[in-house]
Image (cartoon, rainbow, N blue to C red):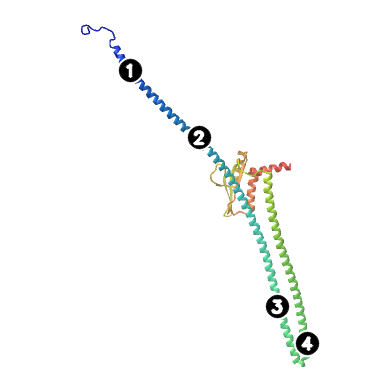
């Protein structure tokens, strides 16, 4: 029948084609779905790993920020302590210069007194030499008297002439004796004067030492009382929250030198006294919170105590917040 007649049915191959197509399609789709699922699982695992790393990184950053904040606070505290120590060092150097000047004045006074003592010693030596010369002259006169007495014994025939000579010599001897007595009295007076001057000198030395010790004790008591007063009444001078200005003052080759380092400057630069006042006045207007004037006096500054104190006191009283607050309080109290 198949060989005799032509198959006239429509879509006679469609059933066989559909039967062979769908299983293959199902297998392919299954493989695709499995690949998709595996990819999703891998991506989820990778995302979880990345999320864990991100959380660890954020925690590390938070720890680093906390450590940086703690380190900054410690550095700020250390810087304030360093500024305070340098200020104390400048004050101690000024005190040392003041004590050196007082020591020089005392040495000058002692040198003057020693010169006076040497002068009195020379006067005493001169008087001693004069007494010795008078004693020699007296001995010579005594020998002359003895010789003349022998001559008078031998030359009795010339009694009148000898008597006249003896009378004249006796008069001369009396004059010399009177001169000797006067000289001895002058010497005794000079000795008494010298002893009284020595006693006055010793008393003056003792009084000077007592006054110097009393002055040192009073200065020490005043400094300690001032420190205690400032500690009790006022807070300590601090650079916290203030604009710090550093000024270095010294003397070079007989000329005064000023080095200035303002806020934001890394290095010092030389400046004149007029320019320094202009800069500090402008900074005082720009920073109403106040200026912290840090005066640096080098170890070999070549300044005297009065020069260092005058410069430091001028800057503090004119521009430093601490001393200006104190001046305001004093004006309020006086009013």
The answer to whether residue 52 is above or below residue 22 is below
* Quadrant of image for the N terminus: top left
Reading the chain from its start, which is encountered first: label 4 or label 2?
Answer: 2
Are the residues at dot 4 and dot 2 in contact (C-beta closer than 8 Å)? no
Reading the chain from its start, which is encountered first: label 3 or label 1?
Answer: 1
* Quadrant of image for the C terminus: top right
Mark number displayed over residue 59: 2
> In percent of the image, x 62 and y 49: which residue is there?
88
Mark 1 nearby-residue class (10 Å; few <14, some 14–19, many ≥20): few
Mark 4 nearby-residue class (10 Å; few <14, some 14–19, many ≥20): few
Are the residues at dot 3 and dot 1 in contact (C-beta closer than 8 Å)? no
Mark number displayed over residue 23: 1
Label 3 to label 4: alpha-carbon separation? 30 Å
Mark 3 nearby-residue class (10 Å; few <14, some 14–19, many ≥20): few
Q: Which residue is mark 3?
A: 132
Image location of residue 78, percent across then percent down: 57, 44
Reading the chain from its start, which is encountered first: label 3 or label 2?
Answer: 2
- Say left or right for 289 vs 167: left
Reading the chain from its start, which is encountered first: label 4 or label 1?
Answer: 1
Label 3 to label 2: alpha-carbon separation? 107 Å
Q: Which residue is mark 4?
A: 164
Q: Nearer the viewer, mark 1 or mark 2?
A: 1
Image location of residue 18, percent across then percent down: 31, 14
Q: Nearer the viewer, residue 39 or 126?
A: 39
Are the residues at dot 4 and dot 1 in contact (C-beta closer than 8 Å)? no
The answer to whether residue 51 is above or below residue 157 is above
Reading the chain from its start, which is encountered first: label 3 or label 4?
Answer: 3
Label 4 to label 1: alpha-carbon separation? 187 Å
């Amino acid at each position: 029948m198949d060989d005799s007649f032509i198959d006239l049915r429509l879509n006679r191959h469609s059933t066989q084609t559909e039967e062979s197509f769908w299983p293959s399609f199902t297998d392919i789709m299954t493989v695709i779905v499995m690949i998709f699922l595996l990819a999703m699982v891998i991506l989820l695992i990778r995302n979880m790993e990345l999320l864990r790393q991100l959380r660890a990184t954020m925690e590390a950053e938070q720890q680093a920020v906390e450590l940086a904040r703690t380190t900054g606070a410690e550095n700020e505290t250390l810087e304030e302590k360093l500024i305070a120590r340098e200020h104390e060092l400048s004050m101690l150097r000024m005190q040392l210069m003041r004590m050196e000047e007082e020591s020089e004045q005392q040495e000058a006074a002692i040198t003057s007194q020693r010169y006076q003592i040497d002068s009195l010693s020379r006067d005493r030596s001169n008087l001693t030499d004069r007494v010795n010369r008078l004693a020699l002259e007296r001995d010579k006169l005594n020998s002359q008297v003895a010789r003349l007495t022998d001559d008078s014994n031998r030359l009795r025939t010339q009694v009148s002439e000898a008597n006249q000579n003896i009378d004249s010599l006796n008069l001369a001897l009396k004059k010399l004796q009177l001169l000797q007595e006067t000289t001895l009295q002058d010497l005794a007076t000079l000795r008494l004067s010298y002893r009284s001057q020595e006693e006055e000198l010793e008393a003056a030395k003792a009084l000077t030492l007592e006054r110097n010790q009393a002055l040192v004790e009073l200065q020490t008591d005043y400094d300690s009382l001032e420190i205690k007063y400032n500690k009790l009444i006022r807070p300590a001078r601090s650079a916290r929250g203030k604009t710090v200005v550093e000024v270095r003052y010294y003397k070079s080759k007989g000329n005064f030198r000023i080095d200035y380092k303002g806020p934001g400057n890394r290095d010092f630069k030389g400046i004149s006294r007029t320019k320094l006042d202009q800069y500090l006045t402008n900074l005082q207007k720009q920073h109403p919170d106040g200026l912290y004037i840090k005066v640096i006096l080098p170890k070999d500054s070549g300044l005297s105590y009065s020069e260092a104190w005058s410069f430091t006191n001028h800057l503090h009283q004119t521009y430093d917040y601490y001393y200006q607050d104190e001046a305001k309080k004093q004006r309020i109290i006086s009013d």
